[in-house]
Amino acid sequence: MGTMVTTAIKGDIDQRMTRRQFVRFMEPRLTFLFRFTFPDIGRLKLEAVGVARTVHGWHFVVTVVERIANKELILIQTALGSDYRRELGNLERSATMQGYSWNRLFSEKVNEITVRRKGRFFRLRQLLRLEAYDIKETGRFKTVGKEIFDHQCSKQLHEIIRQAERKPTWN
């Protein structure tokens, strides 16, 4: 048996809503996604779900046991409600960053600040900490957002997907 291929479907929902509202928002989208038969890959099979609350909304990662092509992955992420600006950026990055991690979610964000060093002022640009990279800080930064993993919400979405997988397919 060969190695299992997985794809991470990632999304950034920039709407402030409660956990209950978020689950209601995601339920019909996930139900449809996991009941749909895709022409090249068939029905998706769930591997794992992770959800985190952010300052501006929610991040989600749904890992499936299929390889999904970049353009189809971006379409799926958009259909699930991910920020369209993020997905248009992903479309551009996926074309230019072959073999690199173009489908990113940020786990922490800090603002640009002005730092005084040796009597001179320097503007430090906004620093985004990527999930896959360790960026060293060279100055003092003010943290403006950090995601917080939501285990209960992850379990709720996991159960919604498992129920959808047990139902007949939609085409």
Image (tube, rainbow, N blue to C red):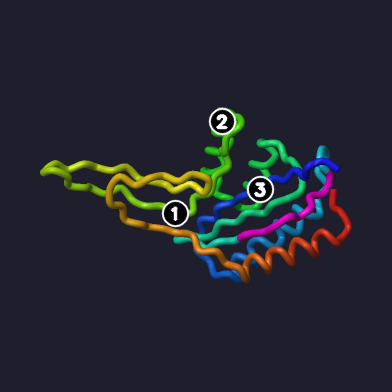
| Amino acid at dot 1 | Glu
Task: Give the residue pinned by disc 1.
Answer: 108
Marks 1 and 3 in Cβ contact (< 8 Å): no
* Residues at marks 2 and 1, CA–CA distance in whole angstroms: 22 Å
Rendering coords of residue 8 (x, y %): 66, 48
Image point (60%, 56%), residue name: 60
Task: Give the residue pinned by disc 3.
Answer: 8
Q: Is residue 84 left or right of residue 126?
A: right
Image point (82%, 59%), residue name: 165
| Amino acid at dot 3 | Ala
Rendering coords of residue 126 (x, y %): 35, 45
Image point (57%, 67%), residue name: 150
Q: Furthest residue to the front? A: 1
Instruction: Give residue 27's quadrant in the image.
Output: bottom right
Q: How many neighbours does mark 2 have within 10 angstroms: few (below 14), some (14-19), or many (20 or more)? A: few
Dot 3: element: strand
**Over which residues does the magenta segment extend?**
42-50
Q: Nearer the viewer, residue 101 or 118?
A: 118
Sequence order check, earlier mark of 2 and 3 = 3
| Amino acid at dot 2 | Met
Q: Furthest residue to the left? A: 119
Rendering coords of residue 25 (x, y %): 63, 62
Task: Give the residue pinned by disc 2.
Answer: 97
Q: Is residue 4 above or below residue 162?
A: above
Q: Is residue 100 left or right of residue 171?
A: left
- Using the image, tell me which numbered label, if any, was put on residue 95: none
Sequence order check, earlier mark of 1 and 3 = 3
